[in-house]
Image: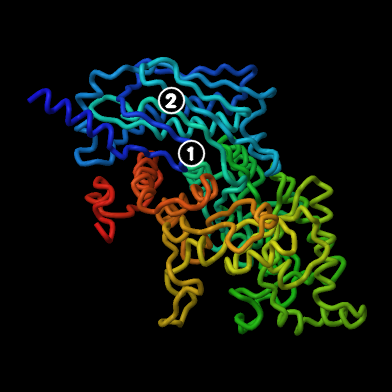
């Protein structure tokens, strides 16, 4: 009977779909041997002058390995592994070493221009308990390797173990930009909620936090020299992000390999500025709001005025100085022309100068973007600036977010701009929750239906593009507009759905949904061990029986 049980265990270890790694590495070779972490397991840095954030990352990894205590997602939650694990070799040491020339901090590496970041790493775990290794050209690569290492281990009956040794990984991202956008203007999110989101992002190698920090509804950002806007435009004196808060968030993100790209949308979505600077805002809170804006309240920068362009340049420059990113997002979406048609100062200037509204927008953009470029920032804009308004003053390095429809990607690429996928038909997390506007009982969200993780996972980033145009794709992101979201449902609406684009843009397209689902279950379960309230994707009965709940099973 013992021999039969041993044979059963050997076979089950060979065929068990135990991998929990997300995103899937470019090369991932595993065996079928059990290996335990030693009670004295340690991580050694073979890095000259290792940065403090790398040392801190090592400490966090050791903490997670000790405290995750995630049971393997199979029937019995790992009980079938117990005999093999009890007699398995133990791993006592993981070493990290750089193969490149320098040792910059993780944050410094993460905040470089997209084309200058190096996130590649190699991971080796022998099956006999001899030293495991992570090697990379950069500290950022070492950090990505640590993230993968953490995902390889399960816990049962006092043992932290894998049943896939030996393990060999060679990994690098398919695209340099993998993001998540959070809108903190429709509803305010405390700093701790943002930090928890950054922790979850780092678990799946998302490397960009697109922070849509202000909008027409509220202005929670305290910008040095412009504090009167947040004083008048935040929801409450406690619902603000001070310069110190921003530095804290940028530092926290950078230490986790995440670049914080701030957005102040201009010239639209700026109504709240009228509370402090009414002279710069056209049609402030005009009604009916649906005539003058896509959302209430109406109000847009009176950008045809040279003094307003200078004001906006100063505002954006001061905000950009708060971040360490090489990028800054100036928005440019949903410009409402009816607002300007009834604004007397705007029409007077256009009549006097002979400029069209879009001529003036081009001049405004030239002024504001020059200020950013002179300060070392590369601008990012929404697609209308290229496709609708034909702004010709954009630099060739400008990044363009394609959001209205994935069908617009080719048109942006044909104009030669580098682009980021953010299409509402694949990546909007707020879709499908019904209408949020009042007195509209039959209403639905404008971007119905709900966008499942499967929908975004199956997106093709280069569909319809020529070989040259494909090189313009920098990556993509999920987005959460927060008309119906706040701190109370942040985790559940984002996770683990947003992990789908993390793998899409790290591993590349073409992943199999059925094969991905068991690994995504692991993402959600592990997130919950770390305090991120990711939702369940299926009943647990299905989660511990991979494939059994497929429609064709």
Question: Foreground: 155 or 331?
Answer: 155
**Is 392 placed left or right of 104 in the picture?**
right
Residue 444, relative to residue 310: is it above or below?
below
Coordinates of residue 377 in the picture (x, y in percent): 76, 48
| Rendered residue at 61%/84% (across/down) | 288
The answer for how far apart the CA atoms under marks 1 and 2 are is 22 Å
- Residue 449's mark? none
Residue 62's label in the rendered image is 2
How packed mark 2 is, by other alpha carbons closer than 10 Å (few <14, some 14-19, many 20 or more), is: some
Residue beneath the point at 23% across and 24% down: 84
Residue 534 appearing in the image: yes
Nearer to us: label 1 or label 2: 1
Which x, y percent locates residue 27? Answer: 48, 36
Q: Which residue is mark 1?
A: 25
Q: Which quarter of the rendering shows the C terminus?
A: bottom left
Q: Is residue 176 left or right of residue 386?
A: left
Q: Position of residue 107 (x, y in %)?
A: 63, 35
Q: Quadrant of the N terminus?
A: top left
Circles 1 and 2 in contact, beta carbons < 8 Å: no
Question: Is residue 19 rendered to the left or right of residue 96?
Answer: left
Element type where label 2 sits in the image? helix
Task: Determine the residue positioned at 87% across, 82% down.
Answer: 348
Disc 1 packing (10 Å; few <14; some 14–19; many ≥20): many
Q: Position of residue 443 (x, y in %)?
A: 44, 80
């Amino acid at each position: 009977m013992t021999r039969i049980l041993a044979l059963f265990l050997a076979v089950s270890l060979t065929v068990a779909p135990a991998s929990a790694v997300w995103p899937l590495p470019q090369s991932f070779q595993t065996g079928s041997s059990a290996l335990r972490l030693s009670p004295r397991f340690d991580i050694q840095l073979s890095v000259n002058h290792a940065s403090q954030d790398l040392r801190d990352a090592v400490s966090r990894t050791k903490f997670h390995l000790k405290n995750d205590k995630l049971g393997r997602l199979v029937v019995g939650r790992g009980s079938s592994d117990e005999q093999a694990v009890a007699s398995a070799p133990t791993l006592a040491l993981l070493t990290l070493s750089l193969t490149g020339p320098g040792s910059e901090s993780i944050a410094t590496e993460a905040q470089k221009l997209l084309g200058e970041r190096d996130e590649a790493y190699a991971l080796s775990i022998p099956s006999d308990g001899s030293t495991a290794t992570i090697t990379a050209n950069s500290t950022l690569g070492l950090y990505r390797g640590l993230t993968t290492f953490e995902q390889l281990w399960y816990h049962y009956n006092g043992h932290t173990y894998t049943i896939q040794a030996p393990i060999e990984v060679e990994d690098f991202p398919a695209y340099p930009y993998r993001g998540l956008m959070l809108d903190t203007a429709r509803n305010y999110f405390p700093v701790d909620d943002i930090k928890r989101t950054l922790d979850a992002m780092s678990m799946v190698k998302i490397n960009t936090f697109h922070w849509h920090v202000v909008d027409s509804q509220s202005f929670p950002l305290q910008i040095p020299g412009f504090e009167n806007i947040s004083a008048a435009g935040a929801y409450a004196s406690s619902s603000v992000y001070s310069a110190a808060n921003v530095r804290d968030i940028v530092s926290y993100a950078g230490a986790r390999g995440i670049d914080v790209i701030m957005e102040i949308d201009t010239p639209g979505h700026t109504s709240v500025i009228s509370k402090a600077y009414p002279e710069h805002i056209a049609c402030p809170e005009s009604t009916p709001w649906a005539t003058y804006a896509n959302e209430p309240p109406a109000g847009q920068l009176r950008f045809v005025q040279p003094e307003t362009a200078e004001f906006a340049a100063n505002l954006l420059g001061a905000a950009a100085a708060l971040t360490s990113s090489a990028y800054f997002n100036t928005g440019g979406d949903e410009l409402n022309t009816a607002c300007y048609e009834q604004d007397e100062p705007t029409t007077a200037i256009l009549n006097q100068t002979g400029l069209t509204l879009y001529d003036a927008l081009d001049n405004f953009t030239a002024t504001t973007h020059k200020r950013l470029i002179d300060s070392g920032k590369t601008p990012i804009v929404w697609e209308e600036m290229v496709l609708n308004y034909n702004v010709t003053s954009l630099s060739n390095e400008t990044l363009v977010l394609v959001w209205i429809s994935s069908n617009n990607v080719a048109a942006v690429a044909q104009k030669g701009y580098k682009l980021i996928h953010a299409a509402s038909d694949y990546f909007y997390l707020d879709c499908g929750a019904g209408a949020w506007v009042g007195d509209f009982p039959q209403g639905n969200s404008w971007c119905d239906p709900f966008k499942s993780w499967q929908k975004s996972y199956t997106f093709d980033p280069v569909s319809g593009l020529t070989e040259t145009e494909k090189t313009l794709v920098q990556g993509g992101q999920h987005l959460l507009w927060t008309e119906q979201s706040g701190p109370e449902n942040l985790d559940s609406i984002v996770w683990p759905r947003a992990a789908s684009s993390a793998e899409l843009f790290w591993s590349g397209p073409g992943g199999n949904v059925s094969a991905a689902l068991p690994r995504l279950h692991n993402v959600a379960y592990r997130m919950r061990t770390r305090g991120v309230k990711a939702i369940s994707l299926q009943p647990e009965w299905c989660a511990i029986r991979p494939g059994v709940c497929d429609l064709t099973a």
